[in-house]
Image: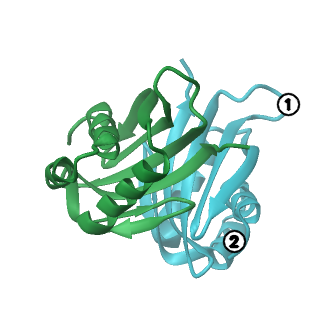
Chain colours: A green, B cyan
Amino acid sequence: MPNAQTIAESYIAFWNAADPEERRRRYRQDWDERATYVDPVMRGSGPDEIGALVAGVQQRFAGFSFRLIGAADGYGDYVRFRWALGPAGAEAPIEGSDVVRLSGGRIAEVIGFLDKVPG
Amino acid sequence: MPNAQTIAESYIAFWNAADPEERRRRYRQDWDERATYVDPVMRGSGPDEIGALVAGVQQRFAGFSFRLIGAADGYGDYVRFRWALGPAGAEAPIEGSDVVRLSGGRIAEVIGFLDKVPG
């Protein structure tokens, strides 16, 4: 399987991709066609729904971008990592932790949690 | 669904149950019959395999017990929490983070990660 750090970096790049065509390309490359995504505020399945979630977050948090916090960690088909969402060069107001299940080396399931939200 | 803290406490009590009959009772009460468990060092499915994993950990770490670190967190069918494994009244040498997926209010899937292991 791809290593945990590579998976995490590709995942973050997907969430930061502003161009829908780039998101589609990254989805085809890294994700399972029937992948599911869930976190405390949204959920979706497959490239159209998950792409729409990313577009919605980018619209809501214009000017913010995602970055990894620390190193990704994984074993077998499972990867976990922490991320921050915020403006460049400033403290991020939002942080979370995601767990990813791979299938055939592709992202098949994401379970997300929020670690920090604006007070 | 049962709240996140209740699920986490029942889960920890299951891992600490030294009596096989108590484990079976707790499994029937809290877990889905076909539940799956995976972490970096072991995996299993259903009451017999998962019960054997617990028995194996108890044998390997005799005198240690599990406890929760902080409060459990959850939404929908997902719960996460951190735990420590160690002797009573001393710093625990092992810590981990588990993500649980519920189905019908019962534990259907556990994905475990290790946060601290003996050096």
Q: Nearer the viewer, residue B81 or A56?
A: A56
Closer to the chain start, of discs 1 and 2, is: 2
Q: Which residue is mark 2?
A: B26
Q: Position of residue A95 (x, y in %)?
A: 56, 39
Q: Which mark is residue B105?
A: none
Q: Are marks 1 and 2 in contact (CB under 8 Å)?
A: no
Tell me the residue that label 1 is attached to: B89
Q: Which of the chains bears the disc numbered 1?
A: B
Circle 1 crowding by C-alpha within 10 Å: few under 14, some 14–19, many from 20: few
**Residue B99 position in % (x across, y down):** 54, 54
Q: Position of residue B109 (x, y in %)?
A: 49, 65
Name above or below for residue B116 compared with residue B45: above
Q: Amino acid at mark 2?
A: Arg
- Name the residue type under label 1: Gly
Residue at 85% x, 30% y is: B89
Instruction: Tell me where residue B10 appears, x and y as whole percent.
Output: 73, 63
The quarter in which the N terminus of chain A is drawn is top left
- For label 1, the SS is loop
Q: For this rendering, which residue is in front, B52 or A91?
A: A91
